[in-house]
Each structure stands twice: as C-alpha cells, then as structure tokens.
Amino acid sequence: MKRYYNKTLGLLLFVLALASCLSNTQNPVDTSLASIKKIDPYPAYSWNYPGDYRLDDLLAGGVSSSDEVSAHVEGLFSLSITRAEDLLPDGKACTGFTAEGKDGKAFFGHNEDWEKGDYLVLRTYPASDYSSISVVDISEANMESTYGRRLLLASAFFPLAGMNSQGLAVSTYSVDQHRASQSLDKPDIIWSVAIRLMLDKAATVPEALALLDSYDMLIDEGNSLQMLIADATGDSAVAAWVNGAMRITRRSGSWQAVSNFVQWEAEESAYTSCARYTSAKEFLISHPETMDEDVGFMLLKTTAQTPHTQFSVVCNLTEREMVLAFGSKFEERHRFDQ
C-alpha cells in the first residue's frame, strides 16, 4: 500500500510540474522571434525564418496587395500581426552591378540608397524550394516587444535584395516612369513577392525571367522600378515594365551596371546623365575581369550616396557567399554563405 501511494504521489507531482512548465512555455513562433540576433549597431539583425511560409498557397490566386500577404501570414501562424504594408518601402535610389572575376567567377553587387532604416538578414528554408538569404527593411517592427516582432513573420515576402542556394541574386532600382498596366490576363503579383518567387524557384536568369513573365506585375504609384537579376553562370539581365509589358536588357560582355533610369531602348544621354552609372561603368572598364569582394566594395564605395546608403552587398555567386556592410561602413563586413 505504501509503495502504491508513493507511485501515485510521484505521478501527481510530475503532472503538476509538466502543467506548470506548459503554462509558462512561449508560443514556439514567439520563441523563434526571441532568437533574433543583433549583428550590427546600425541596427541590423539576423534570423532564420521558422518553417515553411507556403509561397505556393499565397500565389494560388495571385497577390495584388500587401494586405493579402498579411492575411496569409496570419492564417499560417494563427496570430494577429501588424499590417505587412509597413515592410513595402516607397521608391529607392540605388546602384548595382554584375561582373566577371578571376577564374570566371560571377559577382553581384548592390547599394541600397534610401532613408535610414533597420535591417534584417533573413535565411529561409522552404520545404520544396531553394533556400536563400535576403535583406528586409524592418524599420516599422517594434523589436522591443513580442507582439511588435510578429511583423517579421511577413518578412519573407518583402525582400529588397537576396541570393539563393543556386547562386541566383535579385535587387531592385526605382525609376521615375513606366508603370505596369495591371491589365494582363495573368495572375497578379506585387514586386516584393516576385523577388521571393525568383529566390525560391529560379536557378538561372532565364528561369527567373520566365517566372516574372507568367504574372501581371502590380507596381504602385511611387514604386516604379526595375530589377537586376544574375546567376552563377555569369548571366545577368535588367527587367523593367514599360507600357504594360516586361522589357529585358541583357548583359553583354563581362559586366552590367544599373541605377535609376530605364535601360530598355534608352538614349545614350540617359546613361551619361546618371553620375552613379557613369562611375560604375568607368570602374568596371578599368578593372576588367578582376572582380572580387574587395574590388566590389571599392565600386560600391565609389557610387555610395552617404548618408543615404543603407546597406551594401557583394555576392560571390559562384561560391554562394554574400557579404554585407551597413551604413557605408565598408570595412565592417558580415559574411553569410549558402
């Protein structure tokens, strides 16, 4: 009888202890959000997205607004989040390039020039697609509270620039004109989700362009843009939306540069009137097929618009390595690989 009593008491104490632990356990999503690391005082953070964000489900009916992204994320995690539109910035003035390095290695670079922000380096591991590293502006998230951090659950759908495990990289550049028509007989997509689509599902520039061409790109007033897309083979292209159609400017030679004018069928005056494009072109011509990490950051420093340069990235697409610097601190670099 005594032995039975001890076993029963022991079981009761175990159950009570377990219940106490469970009552104090955080939601696993909030636990993941609490694991975000600050990597730079700018500030910048890093985080591994918790699980699969089910991009295919979001795209099933097309995506015409950031509110649809919010609804998708809230349904995915059964949590209320701040509106995801806060992660979709208005226009940006940026400079980018692709170039061949030693031994034929492919490089990609980008300066993000805009208003002061807070940034997240986000790693994603979708179940059936390519993993990637991307950078998101999270200025509107409240990093000091659990609820405030929940906005980052939408961050996978708002990358500004990124590279995937196949060596495909994408970045965006604001332009003053040429809005998309929003009238094609194709599913809708907003530009930030289009970047996510390419990072998750494209290994090469042709694959990325085919994905873009299968959607009707929606670009809001004030957010007209073009995209630089590059891959590990050294191929690259600039995609713009002119009079309702996607227009492509392909790379020819060992480099390609991009800034904030539409390159498709552009007059020579458009190229020469942009000082940053001219600087990038002259730099690339004077450094033929010698691109590497240090040379890339030299180019980005040459074209930076301090204090407006928020982050600078150089990707070795051949070796799947991304190196980041924040706030024009080009010597203080953060290294990520796939």
Image (cartoon, rainbow, N blue to C red):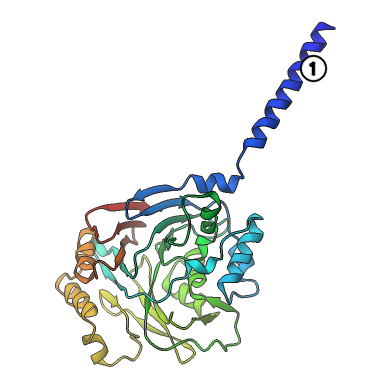
Reply above or below: 174 against 309.
below
Q: Secondary structure at mark 1?
A: helix
Does residue 142 appear left or right of residue 102 in this picture?
right
Reply above or below: 258 against 18.
below
Q: How far across and how far down the image is residue 187, in percent?
A: 60, 79
Q: Residue furthest right?
A: 1
Kind of residue at disc 1: Thr
Which quarter of the figure is the N terminus placed in? Answer: top right
The answer to which image quadrant residue 233 occupies is: bottom left
Q: How far across and how far down the image is residue 47, in percent?
A: 46, 51
Q: How far across and how far down the image is residue 94, in percent?
A: 31, 73
Residue at the image point whose x is 41% and y is 80% from the top: 225
On the image, numbered disc 1 is attached to which residue?
A: 8
Residue at the image point whose x is 52% and y is 81% from the top: 218
Residue 309 seen by the camera: yes
| Front one among 237 and 191 | 191
Residue at the image point whose x is 58% and y is 56% from the top: 52
Does residue 312 appear left or right of residue 221 in this picture?
left
Residue 107 seen by the camera: no
Reply above or below: 227 against 39.
below
| Front one among 134 and 337 | 134
Q: How far across and how far down the image is residue 223, in percent?
A: 43, 79
| Front one among 148 and 322 | 148
The answer to which image quadrant residue 80 occupies is: bottom right
Q: Residue furthest left?
A: 286
Residue at the image point whose x is 56% and y is 65% from the top: 83
The answer to which image quadrant residue 257 occupies is: bottom left
Q: How crowded is the residue under tag 1: few (<14 C-alpha within 10 Å), some, or many (20+)? A: few
